[in-house]
């Protein structure tokens, strides 16, 4: 019994479990091609080059990019590489890595509305190089879960309702105005001595110094 998968015939010994997932595939700066993660070390990863079978280890100095974390610029925002690969696989007639750069760009513009002003020809060529390297070994059915739907930013103004309690005016007691007390005028009439009739007036004499 033969299985028809991804437009290629596989023997019963090869099944879907043997296909790779995008989270296990990386690109290493300075190393050609794509590589599958087959192990880990204290300082990095143990990789196997897809197609060549070459195994090597990475270190702290190596720049490793996991394909699952890569995105492409589109007119509506960033699109994950997993979604681009999935769309390209379903569309069919994917250009090869050596095809004309204009044809490659037009394919992506029609497919995902590629932002041509931000994506270089070298990046587009790299995408098609990766796709053609993965088209027979990648489990494209697993990309559906990785491809998240695009979310549009909510531009409507959200108004926060705040309950405002009406503050009742405080009752202020009328200030009492102090009524000035009526004071009897002091008697400024000089005191007179009442000793005996015909007593003379007493006058204030300053003390001698």
Image (cartoon, rainbow, N blue to C red):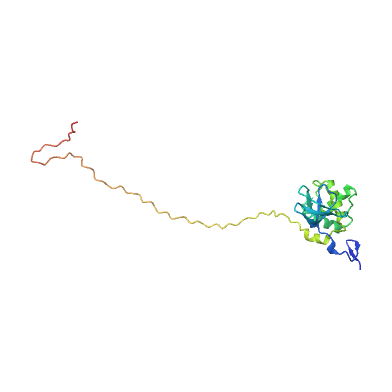
Measured as percent of width and height from the top left, residue 29 is found at 81, 48
Name above or below for residue 138 compared with residue 209: below
Q: Quadrant of residue 89?
A: bottom right
Foreground of the two, 51 or 205: 51
Foreground of the two, 70 or 50: 50
Q: Quadrant of residue 10?
A: bottom right
Can see residue 133?
yes
Quarter holding the C terminus is top left
189 left or right of 1 in image: left
Can see residue 74?
no
Farthest front residue? Answer: 42
Farthest bottom residue? Answer: 1
Foreground of the two, 65 or 157: 65
Measured as percent of width and height from the top left, residue 28 is found at 81, 50
Q: Residue at x 88, y 47 (%)?
A: 101
Count of numbered circles on the image:
0
56 left or right of 173 in image: right
Measured as percent of width and height from the top left, residue 148 is found at 76, 58
Quarter holding the N terminus is bottom right
Farthest left residue? Answer: 197
Measured as percent of width and height from the top left, residue 99 is found at 90, 49
């Amino acid at each position: 019994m033969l299985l028809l998968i991804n437009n290629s015939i596989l023997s019963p010994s090869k099944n879907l479990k043997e296909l790779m997932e995008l989270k296990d595939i990386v690109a290493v700066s300075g190393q050609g091609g794509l590589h599958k993660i087959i192990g880990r070390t204290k300082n990095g990863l143990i990789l196997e080059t897809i197609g060549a079978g070459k195994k090597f280890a990475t270190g702290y100095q190596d720049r490793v990019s996991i394909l699952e974390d890569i995105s492409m610029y589109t007119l509506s925002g960033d699109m994950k590489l997993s979604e681009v690969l999935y769309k390209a696989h379903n569309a069919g007639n994917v250009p090869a890595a050596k095809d004309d750069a204009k044809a490659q760009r037009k394919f992506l513009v029609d497919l995902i509305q590629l932002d041509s002003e931000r994506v270089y020809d070298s990046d587009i060529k790299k995408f098609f190089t990766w796709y053609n390297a993965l088209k027979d070994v990648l489990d494209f059915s697993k990309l559906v879960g990785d491809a998240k739907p695009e979310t549009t930013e909510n531009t409507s103004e959200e108004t926060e309702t705040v309950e405002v309690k009406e503050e009742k005016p405080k009752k202020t007691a009328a200030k009492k105005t102090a009524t000035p007390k009526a004071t009897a005028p002091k008697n400024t009439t000089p005191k007179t001595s009442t000793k005996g009739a015909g007593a003379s007036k007493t006058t204030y004499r300053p003390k001698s110094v």
